[in-house]
Amino acid sequence: AQSARPERRRAPRVVEVLDVAQLTPRMVRIEFGGDGLDGFTAGEFTDHYVKVQFPPPGAGYSAPFDQEEIRATHPREQWPRTRTYSVRAWDPDRLRLTIDFVVHGAEGVAGPWAQRAAAGDLLQLQGPGGAYAPDPDASAYLMVGDPSVIPAIAASLERVPAGRPVQVVLQVADRDDQVELTTPGDLYLHWLHTPGDEVLAHAVRELELPERTDAFVHGEASSVRALRRHLIVERGIHRDALSVSGYWKRSRTEEGWREDKPEWNRLVQADEDT
């Protein structure tokens, strides 16, 4: 029988900012390095992610810190905030980790940190996790999302087989948020600048999707739910050919979204039964 003793959490990694680049008015690319990345194991998947721990403004501590000690000695409002970010690139030979941060001015804790980041700053994180990579046997690929998904889609595009058709549909605020995307595949790229939860689903309904299409659909929860229902119920794409998840939910922090996600999972499952 398995032991009931809980597994001890792995200590977070402490990484150092090496370089900062402004990709768009609302996206900052940061390259990290340092001995804290020794043993980092990204590479199997293209949607690898890390859990980054940010002290809230005015908390009075910075990386490195012991999260359990902070929780025991500080009021709740000063506890670190955990935010999830996709791995844009990982170079195991040079121990270089690249993360693209979506920023919204002074909103949140992660975006303002990324906007102010400079070489030498320290950050602590855990991971990587991940689950998706383009199926090399698929006849075509569909990748859909919003700015939060661009890093994972960009990494996934690099693994699409040469010449294989791949349709990418991305909803961003305006042309300034568009980034260059490249792939060995045959890329059909659709940028959408209209706001709304149903915009992506409406756009995907207009696409021709070959049989054995491998689909990667992530982003805002309401938008993803509409897309998932369309692809499974209306298009008949098998669940095994579909990677789908709500990365975030409008008007909710990541902590709030974690609380909501079990109910969201129940609702999307019910969509298939109606």
Image (cartoon, grey):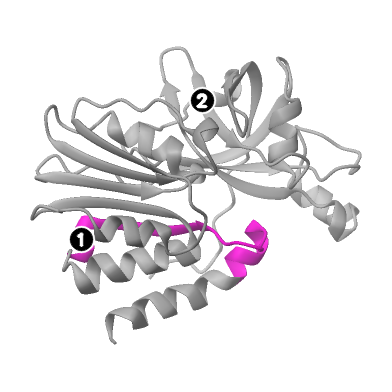
**Residue type pointed to by label 2:** Thr
Of residues 4 and 194, which is closer to you in this image? 194
* Residues tagged 1 and 2 counted as in contact (Cβ below 8 A): no
- Image location (x, y in percent) of residue 89: 43, 26
- Decide whether residue 85 is among the magenta residues: no
Determine which quarter of the picture holds residue 93.
top left
Q: Give the left or right position of residue 97, taking residue 199 as reference.
A: right
The residue at the point 63 percent across, 57 percent down is 254
Res. 17 visible in picture: yes
The residue at the point 36 percent across, 32 percent down is 155
Determine which quarter of the picture holds residue 130.
top left
**Residue type pointed to by label 1:** Asp
Q: Is residue 67 above or below residue 232?
A: above
Q: Which numbered tag is attached to residue 240?
A: 1
Q: Which numbered tag is attached to residue 103?
A: none
Q: Give the left or right position of residue 85, taking residue 155 as reference.
A: right
Q: Is residue 127 above or below residue 3?
A: above
Q: Is residue 260 above or below residue 130?
A: below
**Secondary structure at numbered mark 2:** strand
- Image location (x, y in percent) of residue 139: 9, 45
Q: How many marks?
A: 2
- Decide whether residue 244 is among the magenta residues: yes
For disc 2, the marked residue is 98
**Secondary structure at numbered mark 1:** helix
Q: Start and end of the magenta stretch? A: 238-259
